[in-house]
Image: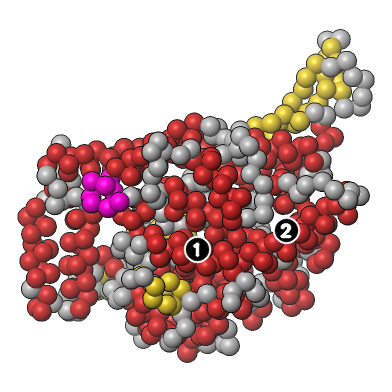
Amino acid sequence: MEQYLNTNHILYEAVKRAERESYLLTEEAQRAARYLRADFERGGIHLCSEKLDRVNQLNIEISQLCREFNENIIIDPGSVDIFPSSRIPKNLHHLVKPIYRATSSTSRESLRTNNTMKEKGFRITTDPHTLSSILQCTPDNEVRKMAYIRGNSAPRANLGVLDKLIVARHELAQLIGDQHYSEFSLKPNMASSPLVAMSFLQEMSKMVRPSADEEFKTIWNYKREKCGQTSGDLEPWDEAYYTAMMKSSAFNLDSSVVASYFPLHRCIEGLKVLVQSLFGATFCSVPLAPGESWHPNVLKMSLHHPEEGDLGYLYLDLYSRKGKYPGCAHFAIKGGRRVSETEYQLPVVALVCNFSGSHDPSTVRLNHWEVETLFHEFGHALHSLLSRTDYQHFSGTRVVLDLAETPSNLFEYYAWDYRVLRTFARHYSTGEVIPEKLVESMQDARKMFAATELQRQIFYAIIDQTIFGEQSTPPEDTSSIVADLKKKYTSWKHVEGTHWQTRFNHLLNYGAGYYSYLYAKCFAATIWQKLCQEDPLSLTTGTALRTKFLQHGGAKEPADLLKDLVGDGILRYNNGGIVPDIRSLCDEMKLTGRK
């Protein structure tokens, strides 16, 4: 039978004793003892055996439900059949599958087989990537509508899975002694309670609403102008299409032209420029030992400092392949820790991406959003590689959830700053440095509809807080909750019968913690403006980032780290919790909603 850590009373008593005798320990060791004791108690070790068994059973159930939720997204992405095939633009044909149906038509779109006329059409699989392209690039309003509704109504099975997950998490939280899962989830974080997180989200919502409403009217007016209508609603399936058209018309941006300046090998060079300029370190290729790598395309590099020696090791697994973990992510393989007075266990991390194309780095080119994602994940990797904590428990990204995304959000700024881009972004064939005017157009296009995007993230975070918060009796249907919140916090319609939440898998891994993305956005904006913006590639900037923030991982109080890094004006105390100061983000986005 599996032995659960939360049933090991000998270890628990040893941790409590260490915490009581904390005068014998370093500050970090005291913190480790406190955190370990809290972890034991969050696992229910203080409960009677019957309740503890139920906690362990619920944790297994929650894990299985999360796996089922993700599997359903892959199994049932939804699909819609479109006839005739001419309704799908040619530049999207690579995303769709040709299909045929019997018809009496004699159009050029038909073909004759065994004296039966067959009309050609296309089947659109409405997975998020394909759906995004269809909504952005298809002029046919009905096609967009059908794809939007189908894509946001799959997988239907996840309605039941999500309901079960909410019930299981609620029961778990109540067994541990909390009112609901949101309270259980937020206790260890800076926010410390749902009250603090929700007040922050509502403040953000109020601040962004006027600008988001203006953007909504701009899109609506543009649609009327293009369609020659004086009336008619702006529908959810219109947003991506008309905003893309407006950006294209205003800035004449071609994504393939932008990508021509970001061959993958140059982007890797950009990561090397960052560590050299900021930290005086270099990445050196390291040969892999037999059996060390999980795939032949994996590269291994050491982060080397001329005075300190190797700081850690980074595996790069950059290309998409069948059966691989989807998306982009950073994985800590081994945390840094002090082994003895003279020996330190170096951190080992993996940066996993899914860049498509040839496996020859010299021919793969990235879209700019992929460059931004690479820099985001590299921010996580640096947090791990530069960490120098005594205990693995606090190494690198092992920090409270609402601080964890701050370094990654900060390094996204580096992917947009021309002073950084000109050091590595070069045309794949001519070697020309990316033109400053092109970067300015990219930056301007990014600012268009930025309030709408921020409002969307706030809306997601409020959904997350609400469904894992206080539960009504009988429980309210999640689709009704989403519809009500959309009406309250945005100007966009909810389409009856759709259930977008059934493939929002952040409800699994964040679980009442999605607000932390917005915490990170605010903290990163303040750090960028106060510390990095003036000279983003200076050793002085890098030294401050490393010694005052990154190297401490979770070994110090997050509020102390942030204030030590940039001084006052980065956070505020509210109802026993900590919230970010939103002024830097407001200034950056020119938002006027705040008083």
Which residue bears the numbered disc 2? 216
* Residue 120 to residue 506: above or below: above
Q: Report helix, strand or loop for mark 2.
A: helix
* Residue 440 to residue 89: above or below: below
Q: Residue at x 44, y 47 (%)?
A: 467
The location of residue 41, given as percent across then percent down, is 19, 55
Which residue bears the numbered disc 1? 201
First to last magenta residue range: 172-179
* Residue 46 to residue 38: above or below: above
**In the figure, is residue 41 to the left or right of 252?**
left
Specify few, some or many for label 1: CA neighbours under 10 Å numbering under 14, 14-19, or 20 or more: many
Q: Residue at x 82, y 57 (%)?
A: 221
Q: Name which residue type carries label 2.
A: Phe
Specify few, some or many for label 2: CA neighbours under 10 Å numbering under 14, 14-19, or 20 or more: many
Q: Quadrant of the C terminus?
A: bottom right
Cβ atoms at labels 1 and 2 below 8 Å apart: no
- Where, by quadrant of the figure, is residue 32 drawn? bottom left
Q: Name which residue type carries label 1.
A: Leu
- Where, by quadrant of the figure, is residue 110 drawn? top right
Q: Nearer the viewer, residue 432 or 173?
A: 173
- Magenta residues, dominant SS class: helix
**Residue at mark 1 to residue at mark 2: CA–CA distance:** 20 Å
N-terminal of the pair, mark 1 or mark 2, is 1
